Image: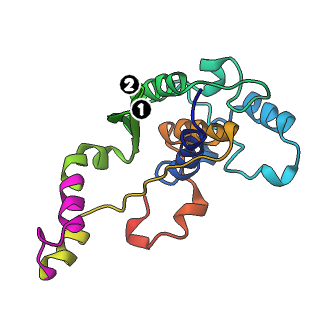
């Protein structure tokens, strides 16, 4: 059974990931998905635009088309391996998303990291990893080099954890949204101008 930490990770990633690409409102919206979300949601306060308005990009698989229903539908719980397989489908259809195994659980299951970024950022992942390694270890970078390293780096947000079993719904939606090239304006407004996508 999937852990609640992994489920929250999925949810947090989807909410966060929409901050990078395109314009969600310029794309075709999956109205069937919207209607299902509204049907299954008990209070309208839980229906912000970040939950609704999933782009319907024919090149990027939606959770509804892959799983037969929306993520988070009552009575349906997807296992980690199913979610990872979905993320692999997103990575195969979108240049904005990459799945990397970063470890293995005690039971021998994969621990995956989902990386989301612009095409240019994705091409420079190794460079940004090296930059973060320099900043993480004070023995590797001199004080006078830190500003230069930061200027040549990208902010990295790591989301992990879990509280609610259907929490992965938001993650699957956001990953799908980002794979289709849609932004999250709410996240963008809090980022410094030079860091906005």
Q: Residue at x 75, y 32 (%)?
A: 31
Number of marks in the rendered image: 2
161 in the magenta segment: no
How many angstroms separate mark 2 from mark 1 (CA)? 28 Å
Task: Answer with the quarter of the image where residue 137 lies.
Answer: bottom left
Task: Please state if 166 lies on the left or on the right of 123 as rendered.
Answer: right
Residue 169 higher or lower than 69, as above or below: below
Task: Answer with the quarter of the image where residue 154 lies.
Answer: bottom left
Mark 2–mark 1 contact, CB under 8 Å? no
Q: Which residue is mark 2?
A: 108
The stretch of residues the image draws in magenta is: 129-143
Task: Please state if 179 lies on the left or on the right of 125 as rendered.
Answer: right
Task: Please state if 187 lies on the left or on the right of 44 as rendered.
Answer: left
Q: Residue at x 20, y 47 (%)?
A: 126
Q: Residue at x 61, y 40 (%)?
A: 4
Q: Main secondary structure of the magenta part?
A: helix
Q: Residue at x 68, y 26 (%)?
A: 77
Crowd tier of the residue under label 2, counting other residues whose Cα lies within 10 Å: few below 14, some 14–19, many 20 or above: few
Image coordinates of residue 30 in percent, x first then y, are 69, 32
Q: Which residue is mark 1?
A: 94
**For the C terminus, which image quadrant?**
bottom left
Q: Which mark is residue 40?
A: none
Task: Please state if 126 lies on the left or on the right of 55 as rendered.
Answer: left
Lower position in the chain sequence, tag 2 or tag 1: 1
Image coordinates of residue 162 in percent, x first then y, are 59, 46
């Amino acid at each position: 059974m999937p852990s609640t930490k992994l489920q929250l990770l999925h949810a947090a990633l989807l909410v966060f990931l929409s901050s990078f690409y395109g314009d969600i409102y310029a794309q075709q919206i999956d109205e069937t998905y919207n209607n299902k979300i509204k049907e299954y949601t008990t209070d309208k306060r839980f229906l912000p635009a970040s939950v609704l308005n999933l782009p319907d990009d024919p090149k990027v698989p939606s959770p509804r088309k892959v799983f037969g229903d929306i993520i988070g539908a009552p009575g349906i719980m997807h296992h980690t391996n199913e979610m990872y397989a979905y993320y692999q489908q997103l990575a195969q259809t979108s240049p904005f998303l990459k799945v990397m195994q970063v470890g293995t659980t005690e039971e021998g299951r994969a621990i995956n990291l989902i990386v989301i970024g612009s095409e240019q950022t994705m091409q420079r992942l190794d460079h940004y990893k090296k930059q973060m390694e320099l900043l993480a270890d004070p023995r590797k970078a001199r004080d006078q080099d830190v500003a230069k390293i930061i200027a040549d780096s990208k902010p990295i947000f790591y989301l992990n954890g879990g509280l609610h079993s259907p929490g992965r719904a938001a993650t699957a939606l956001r990953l799908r949204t980002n794979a289709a090239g849609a932004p999250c304006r709410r996240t963008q407004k809090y980022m410094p101008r030079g860091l906005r996508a």
